[in-house]
Image (cartoon, grey):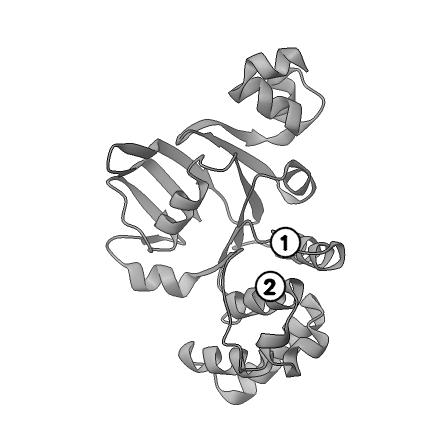
């Protein structure tokens, strides 16, 4: 579902990505873990065709991101922590307007909205204007908007940022439920507990480079640590790990 080969990206003299290569399969939730500035968001923007890599190649759901970006966009839903909504529209109006862009009929759109209402507990957000939303309400509609067309690949970039405990629980349960054959969810965060809960495999980025990738149990075994947080420090900041 995702094949990244030696991808590089620089902003002037700053190297945001340094030859990153990794693969992710259908049927898994794949974690992208790293501190702020590790290169996670740059990599995800490349996957979403919002940025072009300086070098390397990426295929997503069988489509080359540079040769066939339109097919990639049809195959992916993207959520980050800073997406906005038109303040004057209700959640239902937002979703119906995007359904038109996705080529869904009104009946198809309303059926999908009802399904997402059940899965994301949208409730009164559907008929409340977005300008009156809490952070959690807004993020639920942003997620519903991203998956309205039922894409095979979902990219979540710090999607739980700013959510209260109830909205965060709904999000993590939703991510767990996306795990299915022929589907891939890429979950990017710097919050270790979220990765430990929902991700099957994890790639750790640090300073634009891939440090390691594998199942959590294998990363713990390789580092001799008991938690993903301690394993992370052992890999990227061994001097901190020893002090702890």
When the figure is inspected, residue 242 is found, relative to residue 150, above or below; the finding is above
Q: Residue at x 51, y 72 (%)?
A: 85
Q: Residue at x 43, y 76 (%)?
A: 102
Which marked residue is nearer to the observer: mark 2 or mark 1?
1
- 4 left or right, relative to 33: left
Q: Which mark is residue 207?
A: none
Q: Residue 90, percent across and down?
A: 58, 82
Q: CA distance from mark 2 to mark 1?
A: 9 Å
Residue at numbered disc 1: 162
The quarter holding residue 175 reads bottom right
For the C terminus, which image quadrant?
top right
SS assignment at label 1: loop
Q: Going by the picture, which residue comes out furthest to the bottom?
A: 106
- 75 left or right, relative to 15: right
**Visible in this render: residue 150?**
no
When the figure is inspected, residue 55 is found, relative to residue 165, above or below; the finding is above
Does the residue at mark 2 contact the one at mark 1 (Cβ under 8 Å)?
Answer: yes
Q: Residue 5, percent across and down?
A: 33, 36
The quarter holding residue 17 reads top left
- 211 left or right, relative to 194: left
**Visible in this render: residue 128?**
yes
When the figure is inspected, residue 235 is found, relative to residue 155, above or below; the finding is above
Q: Earlier in the sequence, mark 2 or mark 1?
A: 2
Residue at numbered disc 2: 139
- 66 left or right, relative to 199: left
């Amino acid at each position: 579902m995702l094949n990244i080969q030696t991808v590089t990206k620089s902003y002037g003299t700053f190297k945001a990505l340094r030859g990153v290569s990794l693969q992710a399969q259908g049927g898994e939730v794949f974690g992208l873990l790293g501190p702020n500035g590790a290169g996670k968001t740059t990599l995800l923007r490349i996957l979403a065709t919002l940025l072009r890599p300086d070098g390397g190649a990426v295929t997503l759901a069988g489509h080359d991101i540079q040769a066939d970006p339109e097919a990639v966009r049809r195959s992916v839903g993207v959520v980050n922590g800073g997406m906005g909504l038109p303040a004057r529209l209700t959640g239902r109006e937002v979703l119906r307007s995007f359904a038109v862009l996705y080529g869904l009929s009104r009946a198809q759109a309303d059926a999908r909205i009802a399904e997402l209402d059940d899965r994301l507990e949208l409730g009164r957000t559907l008929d409340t204007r977005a300008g009156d939303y809490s952070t959690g309400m807004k993020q639920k509609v942003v997620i519903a908007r991203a998956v309205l067309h039922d894409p095979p690949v979902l990219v979540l970039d710090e999607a739980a940022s700013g959510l209260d405990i109830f909205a965060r629980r709904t999000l993590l349960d939703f991510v767990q439920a996306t795990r299915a054959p022929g589907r891939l969810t890429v979950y990017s965060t710097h919050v270790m507990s979220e990765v430990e809960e929902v991700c099957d495999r994890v790639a750790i980025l640090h300073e634009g480079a891939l440090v390691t990738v594998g199942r959590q149990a294998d990363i713990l075994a390789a580092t001799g640590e008991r938690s993903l947080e301690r394993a992370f420090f052992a890999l990227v900041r061994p001097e901190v790990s020893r002090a702890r």
